[in-house]
Amino acid sequence: MSTLRRLSRGARARLRAVPAISRWHARLRSRAYERTVQAFTRDGSGRANRFPAGIVYEATMRCNLRCEFCYVGDLLNIEGEWRQELPLEAIRRAFPARSGLQVNLTGGEIFMRKDIMEVLDLFARKRYVCGYLTTNGTIIDDARADALAELARRGFLRHISVSVDGPGALHDAARGVRGTFERTAAGLRRLQAAAARRSAPLRLSINTTVAAETLGSLHLMADVAREFGVDAIGLNHLMFATPEEAEQTAKIVGAPDGSAIATFVTPDPSLASADVARQVQRLQGLCREKGLFFDFRPKVWPSIVQHYYTPGAPLLGRCLYPFLHARVGFSGKVYFCPFIRIEVGDLSTSTIEDVWNSPRYVELRRLLLERKLFPVCRRCCKVELSKDPVPGLGAPAARRRTIPLTTIR
């Protein structure tokens, strides 16, 4: 990346940090997005553009931790091929040479993949932009931190999101390995030092999830962010579906059974909506006081939080994710979306362009347009929820909270 381009990018970043300019820029992006998605909805055929706007690549399903709440091993890794990751040469052939294409990486723990730095370098040489990659931060050594900072300096890598469930012992208990919190903190410090040495514009944030086991300590995440030296917290509302919603969705999309539904399936997540609303509001207030950026997904507005955390309650909204983003598994299988793991192509034998408007992909998109949301889409990180509750539904009835937090597979 040339010095002129780096300076230009830095100037743009500083301008977007000005609140008024940031709001103006957000409005422009929102209008551009609406124009794009309206074209798909007007057409109604289920066909997308020639290429996706972005790709989410699940680089590996391997992990070095044993998180008690993680469903990745059993649900996302439905092929059972833990170590047969798409080879570097296949990635080079299957992913298009397309300047500015956004690629985001997740897993598993992506740094468990031995050639992960070569994968990132390959995407950088294709002139992609890595909007974010997610990691637990525990296996980032000095050499890896330095290489990541260099990728940020070159303009490829923009954001690293590190998953944290709470302070100290609480995080260790959730992750199933003692000392995880300190190892995560050490990884973040290495990334910060490497970015400073290289004057790299690398954003670092922590993300956490609403869960029954950690809800009471959610407000402590503001102190964790300060301890880690980051200035942003991303909150994931719990994503789940009832067994009935999973079964209904499987029938709608023509899946043979519910194994294609890759979310937390439970009759009751044991979370009271009032408790969630109070704790989220408390954390948001603390972030404001401490000067921390706070964001959450999906956008569970205060007006719908009660319905969101009531299992089976309908919600209004839409999802255009499959028209814009390709979801690529570690072995090259392309799936309709993160939650509906129906295979629509295979990059071990095809290219992204071949797969992107394949007949099965187009059929599923058309079904989604007709229904706006499938039942399991209501509580997904990609959904665009309306602020308005379902008309005439009223307040959901109070629910007992005695059902254990158990995933139904």
Image: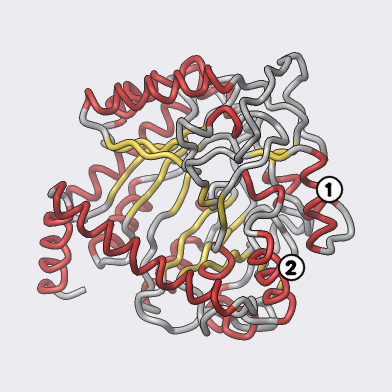
The image shows residue 232, relative to residue 280, as above or below, that is below
Taking depth in this image into account, of 367 and 109 the one nearest to the observer is 367
Res. 212 visible in picture: yes
Q: Which one is closest to the eye, mark 1 or mark 2?
A: 1
Q: Amino acid at mark 2?
A: Glu
Residue extending furthest right? 256
Which comes sooner in the sequence, label 1 or label 2?
1
CA gap between label 1 and label 2 equals 18 Å
Where is mark 2, residue-wise? Answer: 343
Residue visible at 53% across and 34% down?
A: 304
As helix, strand or loop, the secondary structure at mark 1 comes to: helix
Above or below 177: residue 106: below
The answer to which image quadrant residue 241 occupies is top right
Q: Is residue 59 something one can see in this rendering?
A: no
Secondary element at tag 2: strand
The x, y position of residue 298, in whole percent, is: 50, 43
Residue name at image x 58 percent, y 21 percent = 173
Mark 2 crowdedness (10 Å alpha carbons): few <14, some 14-19, many ≥20: some
Render colour scheme: secondary structure
Q: Quadrant of residue 363?
A: bottom right
Residue at 67 percent across and 41 percent down: it is: 314
Q: Is residue 371 left or right of residue 322?
A: right
According to the picture, the residue beneath numbered tag 1 turns out to be: 247
Q: Position of residue 85 (x, y in %)?
A: 65, 64
- 10 Å crowding of disc 1: few (<14), some (14-19), many (20+): some
Q: Locate the C terminus and report the quarter of the image it occupies.
A: top right
Image x and y of residue 161, in percent: 40, 45
Give the residue type at disc 1. Glu
As rendered, which of 48 and 328 lies closer to the eye?
Answer: 48
Query: Which quadrant of the rendered structure holds the N terminus?
Result: bottom left
